[in-house]
Amino acid sequence: MSLKFVSYMSSQSRIMSRKSIEDFLFEVREKNKQLAITGILLLIQGKFVQYIEGPAAEIDNVYESISKDKRHTEMILLDSGDLDERQFKDWSMAYKEVENKQIKAIVGKENLDLEAIFLKGKDLKNHPVLTVLYDFVKTLSS
């Protein structure tokens, strides 16, 4: 079975309450277990940043479904590719709200100004959001 990963960032179409996010995570975790998808969802300065991994066909289907989900707007693909092994073997969907002080510890500045960064078309492969995301990937998967 070939494995694939996708990471993306999106804005919330409307701000979700903590309860709404918890309900959403419960639903997603159950679905991901059935589809053999693992990953992490970060909430960074009001934006969702997600990394999912699993069977290539399932990842493609889930990503397409997410891109049509009305809870997301301004969705931007950050990174994707093939995997030799999973980073999140035991996580149907880890979740973390990232605080500004954590961002500063990882990338050296507190405010990522996500709107400006994405609207100005910076190099996504070296994007600070990916640095934050992959720092959490390393932390949680080790």
Image: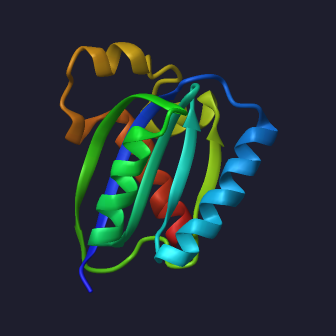
Q: Residue furthest right?
A: 19
Residue 104, given in percent of the width and then of the height, sits at 52, 31
Residue 51 picture location, percent across and down: 42, 54
Q: Give 70 or 92, whichever is nearer the viewer.
A: 70
Q: How is the image coloured?
A: rainbow
Q: Is residue 81 above or below residue 42?
A: below
Of 67 and 120, which appears nearest the observer? 67
Tell me which corner region of the image, top left, top right, bottom left or bottom right, holds residue 57: bottom left
Q: State left or right for residue 21 relative to residue 19.
A: left
Residue pictured at 38% horizontal, 41% vertical: 67
Q: Position of residue 91 (x, y in %)?
A: 58, 70
Q: Tag count in the figure?
A: 0
Q: Residue at x 36, y 34 (%)?
A: 128
Q: Is residue 124 above or below residue 26?
A: above
Tell me the quarter of the picture where residue 16 sits.
top right
Asked if 91 appears above or below 97 in the picture, the reply is below
**Residue 19 position within the rendered picture, expressed as x and y whole percent measured from the top left:** 81, 41
- Image-based side of 42 in relation to 79, left or right: right
Q: Is residue 55 left or right of residue 113?
A: left
Would you identify the image quadrant in which residue 42 lies?
top right
Nearest the viewer among 97 and 128 is 97
The image quadrant where one finds the N terminus is bottom left
- Looking at the image, which residue is at 44% across and 32% down? 10
